[in-house]
Image (cartoon, rainbow, N blue to C red):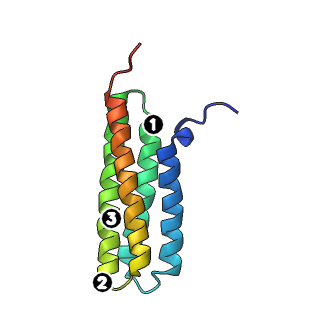
Amino acid sequence: MGNKGFKDLAVWQQAKDLAVLTYRISDSEMKDVDFGLKDQIRRSAVSVASNLAEGDERGTDKESIRYFFIAKGSVAELRTQLQIAHESGHLKKTIYETLETDYAILGKRIGKLIQARRTPSRP
């Protein structure tokens, strides 16, 4: 089938899968969460995958890296929002810890992607 562009990026696939999981969890486990926080959690999760996709489609590594940094920032936002949801009693500890671990790993992977794009390719 050929190159699928950003869909070939393992880090994008992980971000997209986590966004889907976060949506499902927000439906099933966060019924009593204030709409604003629930909506922000969802938007941050979608933002990570979206910015990875947009960055990968940019014409230069410099442009791509800018979007990858935005995705990394969205991971930090999301981890903060999930912690607030947990500490305010709206997200079970086991679910919070699983998402926290998964998003921390994703953030590190995005950091590695940024480094890889910053490093000039060798002939």
- Residue 97 shows up from this direction: yes
- Residue corresponding to mark 3: 79
Going by the picture, which residue comes out furthest to the top? 123
Q: Earlier in the sequence, mark 2 or mark 3?
A: 3
Q: Nearer the viewer, residue 109 or 81?
A: 109
- Residue corresponding to mark 2: 88
Image marks 2 and 1: residues in contact by CB distance under 8 Å: no
Q: Specify the amino acid type for callout 2.
A: Ser
Q: CA distance from mark 1 to mark 3?
A: 23 Å
Q: Specify the amino acid type for callout 1.
A: Asp
Q: Earlier in the sequence, mark 2 or mark 1?
A: 1
Q: CA distance from mark 2 to mark 1?
A: 36 Å
Image position of 27 with respect to 106: above or below? below
Q: Residues within 10 Å of mark 3 (few under 14, many from 20)?
A: many
Image position of 83 with respect to 117: above or below? below
Q: Nearer the viewer, mark 1 or mark 3?
A: 3
- Residue corresponding to mark 1: 56
Q: Quadrant of the N terminus?
A: top right
Q: Earlier in the sequence, mark 1 or mark 3?
A: 1
Residue 101 screen position, x and y as percent: 38, 63
Residue 121 screen position, x and y as percent: 38, 20
Image marks 2 and 3: residues in contact by CB distance under 8 Å: no
